Image (cartoon, grey):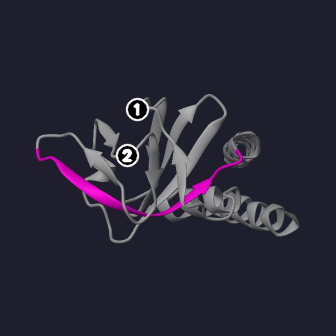
Protein backbone atom coordinates (compact mmCIF):
# COMPACT_ATOMS: atom_id res chain seq x y z
CA UNK A 1 0.00 0.00 0.00
CA UNK A 2 2.95 2.33 0.63
CA UNK A 3 3.99 2.22 -3.00
CA UNK A 4 0.48 3.18 -4.09
CA UNK A 5 0.64 6.32 -1.95
CA UNK A 6 4.03 7.15 -3.45
CA UNK A 7 2.74 6.62 -6.97
CA UNK A 8 -0.35 8.72 -6.24
CA UNK A 9 1.80 11.55 -4.89
CA UNK A 10 4.08 11.35 -7.93
CA UNK A 11 1.07 11.51 -10.25
CA UNK A 12 -0.28 14.48 -8.30
CA UNK A 13 3.08 16.24 -8.48
CA UNK A 14 3.41 15.66 -12.22
CA UNK A 15 -0.17 16.68 -12.86
CA UNK A 16 0.38 19.82 -10.79
CA UNK A 17 3.07 20.83 -13.30
CA UNK A 18 0.66 20.50 -16.21
CA UNK A 19 -0.44 23.73 -17.78
CA UNK A 20 -3.97 22.76 -18.79
CA UNK A 21 -6.98 22.63 -16.48
CA UNK A 22 -7.75 18.98 -17.32
CA UNK A 23 -5.76 15.84 -16.78
CA UNK A 24 -4.47 14.03 -19.86
CA UNK A 25 -5.69 10.50 -20.51
CA UNK A 26 -2.29 9.18 -19.37
CA UNK A 27 -2.47 11.15 -16.11
CA UNK A 28 -6.03 9.94 -15.45
CA UNK A 29 -5.03 6.33 -16.10
CA UNK A 30 -1.92 6.61 -13.90
CA UNK A 31 -3.98 8.09 -11.06
CA UNK A 32 -6.54 5.30 -11.32
CA UNK A 33 -3.85 2.61 -11.53
CA UNK A 34 -2.32 4.04 -8.35
CA UNK A 35 -5.63 3.36 -6.58
CA UNK A 36 -6.35 0.00 -8.18
CA UNK A 37 -6.01 -3.34 -6.49
CA UNK A 38 -4.51 -6.47 -7.98
CA UNK A 39 -6.26 -7.85 -11.07
CA UNK A 40 -9.28 -10.07 -10.43
CA UNK A 41 -10.85 -12.58 -12.78
CA UNK A 42 -14.40 -11.21 -12.48
CA UNK A 43 -16.87 -9.09 -10.51
CA UNK A 44 -20.55 -9.38 -9.67
CA UNK A 45 -22.78 -7.44 -12.00
CA UNK A 46 -26.55 -7.29 -11.85
CA UNK A 47 -27.04 -5.29 -15.05
CA UNK A 48 -26.99 -1.83 -13.48
CA UNK A 49 -24.22 0.66 -14.26
CA UNK A 50 -24.32 3.63 -11.87
CA UNK A 51 -21.87 5.55 -14.05
CA UNK A 52 -18.72 5.29 -16.09
CA UNK A 53 -15.74 7.31 -17.20
CA UNK A 54 -13.38 6.71 -20.09
CA UNK A 55 -9.65 6.95 -19.49
CA UNK A 56 -8.58 7.36 -23.10
CA UNK A 57 -9.19 4.58 -25.60
CA UNK A 58 -7.56 1.74 -23.66
CA UNK A 59 -9.26 1.82 -20.24
CA UNK A 60 -12.34 2.95 -18.37
CA UNK A 61 -13.92 3.02 -14.92
CA UNK A 62 -17.33 1.46 -14.32
CA UNK A 63 -19.28 2.39 -11.18
CA UNK A 64 -21.56 -0.49 -10.18
CA UNK A 65 -22.55 0.61 -6.67
CA UNK A 66 -22.10 3.83 -4.66
CA UNK A 67 -18.69 2.80 -3.30
CA UNK A 68 -17.80 0.09 -5.81
CA UNK A 69 -15.93 0.81 -9.02
CA UNK A 70 -13.77 -1.19 -11.38
CA UNK A 71 -10.90 -0.25 -13.64
CA UNK A 72 -11.37 -2.08 -16.94
CA UNK A 73 -8.47 -2.28 -19.38
CA UNK A 74 -8.74 -3.54 -22.95
CA UNK A 75 -6.52 -5.92 -24.90
CA UNK A 76 -6.48 -3.45 -27.81
CA UNK A 77 -7.59 0.14 -28.13
CA UNK A 78 -11.30 0.84 -28.08
CA UNK A 79 -11.51 3.69 -30.59
CA UNK A 80 -15.15 4.63 -30.04
CA UNK A 81 -14.92 4.79 -26.24
CA UNK A 82 -13.94 8.48 -25.85
CA UNK A 83 -17.03 9.42 -27.90
CA UNK A 84 -19.52 6.87 -26.57
CA UNK A 85 -22.75 8.17 -25.10
CA UNK A 86 -24.17 4.87 -23.89
CA UNK A 87 -22.42 1.66 -22.84
CA UNK A 88 -23.29 -1.77 -21.54
CA UNK A 89 -21.39 -4.79 -20.25
CA UNK A 90 -21.71 -8.36 -21.38
CA UNK A 91 -21.90 -10.83 -18.50
CA UNK A 92 -22.53 -14.47 -17.72
CA UNK A 93 -24.48 -15.57 -14.65
CA UNK A 94 -24.30 -12.09 -13.07
CA UNK A 95 -20.51 -11.83 -13.44
CA UNK A 96 -18.27 -9.84 -15.78
CA UNK A 97 -15.11 -11.80 -16.62
CA UNK A 98 -11.73 -10.55 -17.80
CA UNK A 99 -10.59 -11.95 -21.15
CA UNK A 100 -14.15 -13.05 -21.96
CA UNK A 101 -16.66 -10.23 -21.55
CA UNK A 102 -16.88 -6.94 -23.39
CA UNK A 103 -17.84 -3.30 -23.01
CA UNK A 104 -20.65 -2.66 -25.48
CA UNK A 105 -20.83 0.76 -27.14
CA UNK A 106 -24.43 1.57 -28.08
CA UNK A 107 -23.95 4.47 -30.44
CA UNK A 108 -24.61 5.21 -34.12
CA UNK A 109 -22.01 2.59 -35.01
CA UNK A 110 -22.30 -0.14 -32.35
CA UNK A 111 -19.02 -1.69 -31.26
CA UNK A 112 -17.58 -3.76 -28.45
CA UNK A 113 -14.22 -3.93 -26.72
CA UNK A 114 -12.87 -7.04 -25.00
CA UNK A 115 -11.94 -6.55 -21.33
CA UNK A 116 -8.42 -7.82 -20.67
CA UNK A 117 -7.96 -6.78 -17.04
CA UNK A 118 -10.31 -5.97 -14.16
CA UNK A 119 -9.04 -4.19 -11.05
CA UNK A 120 -11.07 -3.02 -8.05
CA UNK A 121 -10.65 0.67 -7.25
CA UNK A 122 -10.30 2.30 -3.84
CA UNK A 123 -12.97 4.89 -4.61
CA UNK A 124 -12.61 6.87 -1.38
CA UNK A 125 -8.84 7.30 -1.72
CA UNK A 126 -9.20 8.16 -5.40
CA UNK A 127 -11.83 10.82 -4.65
CA UNK A 128 -9.61 12.29 -1.93
CA UNK A 129 -6.59 12.49 -4.24
CA UNK A 130 -8.70 14.00 -7.04
CA UNK A 131 -9.95 16.67 -4.62
CA UNK A 132 -6.37 17.34 -3.52
CA UNK A 133 -5.31 17.64 -7.16
CA UNK A 134 -8.14 20.08 -7.95
CA UNK A 135 -7.16 22.19 -4.94
CA UNK A 136 -3.51 22.24 -5.99
CA UNK A 137 -4.44 23.29 -9.53
CA UNK A 138 -6.73 26.03 -8.22
CA UNK A 139 -3.93 27.37 -6.02
CA UNK A 140 -1.51 27.20 -8.95
CA UNK A 141 -3.91 29.22 -11.13
CA UNK A 142 -4.45 31.78 -8.37
CA UNK A 143 -0.69 32.19 -7.97
CA UNK A 144 -0.36 32.61 -11.74
CA UNK A 145 -3.09 35.27 -11.75
CA UNK A 146 -1.41 37.16 -8.91
CA UNK A 147 1.93 37.35 -10.69
CA UNK A 148 0.53 39.38 -13.57
CA UNK A 149 -0.38 42.36 -11.32
Q: Is residue 32 magenta?
A: no
Residue at figure coordinates x 21%, y 40% from the top left = 106
Q: Is residue 116 magenta?
A: yes
**Percent x, y of residue 125:** 76, 45
* Along the viewing direction, whichever of 93 and 133 lies nearer the viewer: 93
Residue at figure coordinates x 65%, y 50% from the top left = 121
* The residue positioned farthest toward the right in the image shown: 2
* Along the viewing direction, whichever of 47 and 25 lies nearer the viewer: 47
Q: Residue 107, relative to residue 74: is it above or below?
A: above
Relative horizontal placement of residue 128, taking residue 38 as reference (left or right)? right
Residue at figure coordinates x 53%, y 54% from the top left = 42
Q: Which residue is mark 2?
A: 91
Q: Write down the quadrant of residue 47 in the picture.
A: top left
Q: Which residue is mark 1?
A: 47
* Along the viewing direction, whichever of 32 and 44 lies nearer the viewer: 44
Does the rendering let one see residue 15?
yes
**Percent x, y of residue 148:** 67, 47
Q: Which residues are magenta?
A: 109-122
**Percent x, y of residue 105:** 25, 45
Does the rendering let one see residue 21?
no
Question: Predominant secondary structure in magenta?
Answer: strand
CB contact under 8 Å: marks 2 and 1? yes
Q: Callout 1 environment at 10 Å: few (<14), some (14 to 19), or many (20+)?
A: some
**Percent x, y of residue 32:** 62, 56
Q: Earlier in the sequence, mark 2 or mark 1?
A: 1
- Give the total of numbered labels: 2
Residue 24 numbered mark, or none? none
Per the model, the C-alpha gap separating discs 2 and 1 is 8 Å
Residue at figure coordinates x 72%, y 49% from the top left = 140
SS category of the residue bearing label 1: loop
Amino acid sequence: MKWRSSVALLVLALAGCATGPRLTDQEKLALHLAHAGEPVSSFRFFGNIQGWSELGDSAMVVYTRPNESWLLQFDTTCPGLPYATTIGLSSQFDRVHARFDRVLLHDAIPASCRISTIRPLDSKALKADMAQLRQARMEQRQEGDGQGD
